[in-house]
Amino acid sequence: MAFQDKSLTCADCGANFTFSAEEQEFFQTKGYTNEPKRCPSCRQARKAERPGAGRRQMFPAKCASCGKDTEVPFEPRGDRPVYCSDCYRKVKPSR
């Protein structure tokens, strides 16, 4: 099924936002049947309001692939490589 970008209106702020074909495909793979009601900014703000939001401890690390300084949500032990988000997307096993 070929998806096409859709223009939607945010239920919170009333702004128009694009529900991209890629996002629609992602929603389908997750089994979601409803379109998003909020724009990305309002979704992010809503997530931040949840209990426990923003309390995740981050640890400094150096990417094993590109050497860039990054942060990860676990304490690196040194026995496995740690990657920045860009490099992780390149090396992670596809499911």
Image (cartoon, helix red, strand yellow):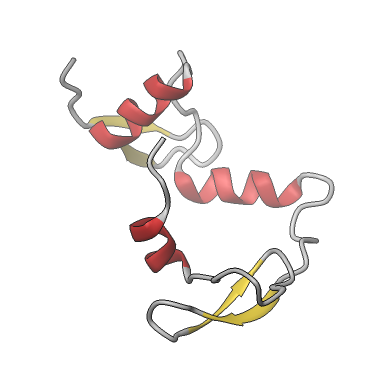
In the image, 54 versus 56, the foreground residue is 56
Q: Does 95 sit above or below residue 2?
A: below
x and y percentages locating residue 39 in the rendered image: 45, 41
Q: Does 45 sit above or below residue 95?
A: below
In the image, 6 versus 32, the foreground residue is 32
Q: How many marks?
A: 0
x and y percentages locating residue 95 in the rendered image: 41, 35
In the image, 7 versus 47, the foreground residue is 47
Left-right relation of 3 to 40? left
Left-right relation of 20 to 65? left
Q: Residue furthest front?
A: 79
Image quadrant occupied by the N terminus: top left
At 54% across and 71% down in the image, what residue appears?
A: 81
Residue 20 appears in the picture as rendered: no
Q: Quadrant of residue 5?
A: top left
Left-right relation of 65 to 75? left
Q: Residue furthest right?
A: 51
x and y percentages locating residue 9 in the rendered image: 39, 32
Q: Quadrant of residue 46?
A: top right
Residue 67 appears in the picture as rendered: yes
At 76% across and 53% down in the image, what residue appears?
A: 53
